[in-house]
Image (spheres, helix red, strand yellow):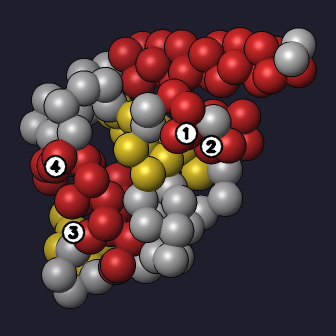
Amino acid sequence: ALCEAWDLKTNWVQSTGEVKPSSESLSHAAVYDVQPMANCALHVHSPEIWCASRELGIVTTDRKVPYGTPEMANEVHDKVHALSSPGIFSMGGHEDGIFTFGRTLADAGSLLIDFLVRARVLKGAGNQQ
């Protein structure tokens, strides 16, 4: 699905394609609305990063806000607006949900891999104690 237009306030997405847009389309849209430099927003499921979000200093959305809702899109909008750098946040109300964003797919993907490595190092350090 290609999302061509959206409105967070009315929970509306206009898309084309053979499949329906993701339930997180508005969360992606919120990133693009707030970060004009972002040409790529990745949403992945990473239990390692998600569980280590606090230790890694990753901003996290409110755990009470369920994913796929207008409330989550608004939460993403607010959290991303407050971010300076890097382009990563954890979805508190979406177990294992992580977003990265950047100017390119390579930028967003590299950031994701960097935090995955850091999470694994933390996990390994915790096992050695």
Residue type, numbered disc 1: Ser
- The alpha-carbon separation of the residues under discs 1 and 2 comes to 5 Å
Residue 36 location, x and y as percent? 11, 38
The relative height of residue 86 versus residue 75 in the rendered view (above or below) is: above
- The alpha-carbon separation of the residues under discs 1 and 4 comes to 18 Å
> How many other residues sit within 10 Å of disc 2, few (<14), some (14-19) or many (≥20)?
many
Q: Which numbered circle lies on residue 50?
A: 2
**Mark 2 or mark 4: which comes first in sequence?**
2
- The alpha-carbon separation of the residues under discs 2 and 4 comes to 20 Å
**Mark 1 or mark 4: which comes first in sequence?**
1
Q: Are marks 4 and 3 in contact (CB under 8 Å)?
A: no
Q: Are marks 1 and 2 in contact (CB under 8 Å)?
A: yes
**Mark 4 or mark 3: which comes first in sequence?**
3
* Side of 72 where 54 appears, left or right: right
Dot 2 falls on a residue whose secondary structure is helix
Residue type, numbered disc 2: Trp
> How many other residues sit within 10 Å of disc 1, few (<14), some (14-19) or many (≥20)?
many
Residue at label 3?
6
Residue 27 location, x and y as percent? 36, 60
* Side of 37 where 21 appears, left or right: right
